[in-house]
Amino acid sequence: MRTREDLIARVLKNLGVLAAGQAPSDEDRAEVDDLIDPVCAKLLDDGVAKLNGDEIDDAAYLPLADIVAERAMVPFGIGGTRAGEIKTAAEQARTDLKLAYRVYDARPPMRLEQFWGRRGGSLPINSRGRPITPPEDIDLDVTVDGGRRG
C-alpha cells in the first residue's frame, strides 16, 4: 500500500517538477494534495474505480498518479508535447483502472418466462397447481337416479 505522500511525489515526478532525490516544496505538495480527493470522486462517479486517496493499492498507484498529473497540468503550467504525453498516459491509466477494478455482479442472470399463457399448456390450473380436466373429456354416461336406467 502506498500513502498520499508517495502519490504526491509520483505526480510531481510525472509532471517533471520534481527531480530525483528532491523533496517537494510545501506549495507544490498542497497544490497536488487539493486535487487527489476530487479526482478519486470523479473516478467513482464515472464508474472507473473506487479509490481512497489516503491508502492506495499498488495496482492503482501509477495509474492514479497519471490521472492526477493530468489534472495538475494547468496549475503547474505544463503545455506542448509534454501535455500531450501526460494526457495519453492518463487515458491509458483510466483504461487500466477500469479493467483492474471491474465490478462483477454475483447474481445469476434472470431467467425470462413468457408472460402469456400458463405453465403446462393452455389448460386452467386449480389451487394445487394441477391442470383442470376440460369438460369434453369427462364421461357423461352417468345417470341421476343411482345408476338405474329406464
Image (cartoon, rainbow, N blue to C red):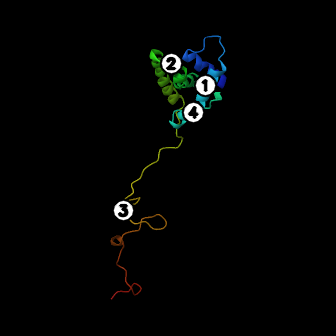
SS at mark 4 in the image: helix
Question: Could you say which is closer to the camera, residue 142 or residue 88?
Answer: 88
Q: Label 4 to label 3, Cα distance in Å?
A: 59 Å
In the rendered image, residue 99, in percent from the top left (x then y), is placed at 50, 29
Which is closer to the viewer, label 4 or label 3? 4
The residue that mark 3 highlights is 122
| Residue at image point 39% right, 57% down | 115
The residue that mark 2 highlights is 78
Q: Label 2 to label 3, Cα distance in Å?
A: 72 Å
- Return the mark for residue 38: 4
Find out whether the residues at labels 4 and 3 contact each other: C-beta distance under 8 Å: no
Q: Is residue 53 visible?
A: yes
Which is closer to the viewer, label 4 or label 2? 2
Specify which label sits upstream in the sequence, 4 or 1: 1
Specify which label sits upstream in the sequence, 1 or 2: 1
Look at label 3 and name its amino acid. Answer: Ser
- Return the mark for residue 31: 1
In the rendered image, residue 6, in percent from the top left (x then y), is placed at 65, 21
| Residue at image point 48% right, 16% down | 82
Question: Could you say which is closer to the camera, residue 27 or residue 44?
Answer: 27
Specify which label sits upstream in the sequence, 2 or 3: 2
In the rendered image, residue 130, in percent from the top left (x then y), is placed at 45, 64
Q: Residues within 10 Å of mark 1 (few under 14, many from 20)?
A: some
| Residue at image point 37% right, 80% down | 142
Residue with the most extreme top position: 20
Look at label 1 and name its amino acid. Answer: Glu
SS at mark 3 in the image: loop
